[in-house]
Image: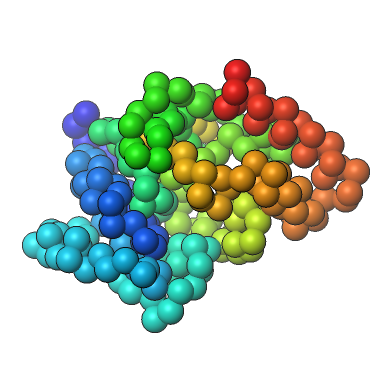
Amino acid sequence: MQIGEDLQMEDMISVIIPAYNCRTTLKQAVDSVLIQQVPLEVLVIDDGSLEPIADIMESYREDSRVIFLKNTKNMGVSATRNRGVQEARGKWIAFLDSDDYWAPGKLARQLELLQQTKSVLCSTGRELMTAEGKLTGKVIPVKEVITYEDLLHQNWINNSSVLVKKEILLEFPMEADEIHEDYLLWLKVLKKYKKVYAINEPLLKYRVDKNSKSGSKIHSAIMTYKTYRKLGLGRRQAWRSFISYAVAGLKKYYV
């Protein structure tokens, strides 16, 4: 896909990749950003990784779009993403986890949809891959119009698929790494802005790793309930939303 005439430098995208113990996957993530045919910069932020990645980033030294930053200590994913937002020069922000990657044309298609709808956020569907990086063919669809009520009952928005206005992330910084920090953020955004849009195609390739923060289903379920409570929902409403979320999760991954 060629960049449209309306996709000029004022629409530059800042892609934020927190990097922590990701030597085997980081390059694929960065390379999938650099093939996107839009004006962009990519901020790779080393969050005190125990695995050295400076040698990997050295291969991008001649590419002015790539910026390598280091935290002075491990700050956690929310603070690292927030730092990226503060450092970003783009009008738009895209998050990409270091073990995921994008299909060609993802960002251009999202920008076009955002321009058409005048929305603040655009998500996409995703295809699952194994921890070893093998695509499974299992596609997780997404609603093309997502409301706050939709999101309360199912998290339709995957963090690595999002393209969002920078000003929104300055208004709602990420917080609470101990729960689903990204889900909490999108709930806050939807509560104020009512609806957002998505492309129902698997433009994100998403790694399923049982050792990840959400790998344990029981632990993930507890975090989901705590996310609702952190949002400010009463116990009864939080339980209703959680039950809907759990049923949707079973259908999403096992049906």
Tell me: 201 left or right of 29.
Answer: right
- Image coordinates of residue 231 in percent, x first then y, are 74, 54
Q: Locate residue 130: give its quadrant.
A: top left
The residue located at (28%, 57%) in the rendering is 23
Residue closer to the observer: 100 or 192: 100
Tell me: 199 left or right of 108.
Answer: right
Can you see residue 64?
no
Residue closer to the observer: 91 or 21: 21
The residue located at (39%, 62%) in the rendering is 20
Total labels drawn: 0
Q: Locate residue 205: give its quadrant.
A: top left
- Image coordinates of residue 213 in percent, x first then y, are 55, 53
For residue 200, above or below residue 241: above
The residue located at (52%, 58%) in the rendering is 169
- Taking the view exactly as shown, the residue that stands out farthest to the right is 236
For residue 120, above or below residue 82: above
- Taking the view exactly as shown, the residue that stands out farthest to the bottom is 72
Tell me: 46 left or right of 59.
Answer: right
The residue located at (23%, 51%) in the rendering is 27
Tell me: 23 left or right of 91.
Answer: left
- How has the structure been colored for display? rainbow
- Taking the view exactly as shown, the residue that stands out farthest to the left is 62
- Image coordinates of residue 199 in percent, x first then y, are 45, 28
Q: Locate residue 70: give its quadrant.
A: bottom left
Quadrant occupied by the N terminus: top left
Quadrant occupied by the C terminus: top right
Can you see residue 36?
yes
